[in-house]
Amino acid sequence: MTFNDKLQADSVPDLQEHPWISLETALDVEAWMDLQHRELQQALGNKPTTGQGICLSLLHGGELYLHTNSDGDVLLDLTPEAQWVTPVLSAVTQTAAPRGQVWCLQGHVLIQLMLGLNTLVASSRLVLKHQYKGARHNSMQ
């Protein structure tokens, strides 16, 4: 089943973990991001909240929490078990690793990021509230 088939067949958010479906092109990534955004908005309703986003469970251990803010910036929060993916994140975003575990990236790297992580993701789930580790992040380049 291709990503576009999955997109058409499954669009009801349930906050359950879903097996990863390979994203092969920038269009696949954009369609996936649009679906995640719509499902997140549907799940949140009119409730004001912060920290909503997506949790990617990585094949070799750990989780990566992904959130975009109102300015279009991308926040990535890696669990300690996911630190192994740091060189990949640096390579695909062309950004040095932060001192802490939270990365703050410009929004234009999101497609490259998702394509670069594609083969390393085991599953994903929507997250309605995640506490990002505050001030420990990169300044944006």
Image (cartoon, grey):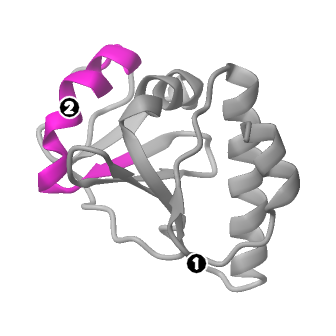
**Residue at 20 percent of width and 51 percent of height:** 61
Mark-to-mark CA distance, 1 and 2: 28 Å
Please say whether residue 82 is one of the residues in the magenta stretch: yes
**Residue at 52 percent of width and 48 percent of height:** 20
Q: Is residue 112 left or right of residue 71?
A: left
- Specify the amino acid type for callout 1: Thr
Q: Is residue 95 left or right of residue 52?
A: left
- At label 1, counting other C-alpha atoms closer than 10 Å, the crowd grade (few under 14, some 14-19, many 20 or more) is few
- Badge 1 vs badge 2, beta-carbon distance below 8 Å: no
Front residue of 18/98: it is 18
Residue highlighted by disc 1: 49
| Secondary structure of the residue carrying numbered label 2 | helix
Vertical comparison of 45 with 3: above or below: below
**Residue at 43 percent of width and 23 percent of height:** 116
- Specify the amino acid type for callout 2: Thr
**Magenta residues, as a range?**
76-95
In the image, farthest residue toward the bottom: 47
Q: Quadrant of residue 121?
A: top left
In the image, farthest residue toward the right: 8
Q: Which image quarter is the N terminus in?
A: top right
Q: Nearer the viewer, mark 1 or mark 2?
A: 2
Vertical comparison of 17 with 20: above or below: below
Q: Which image quarter is the C terminus in?
A: top left
x, y (%) of residue 72? Answer: 61, 40
Q: Quadrant of residue 9?
A: bottom right
**Residue at 50 percent of width and 29 percent of height:** 106
Residue highlighted by disc 2: 86
| Secondary structure of the residue carrying numbered label 1 | loop
In the image, farthest residue toward the front: 1
Front residue of 124/135: it is 124
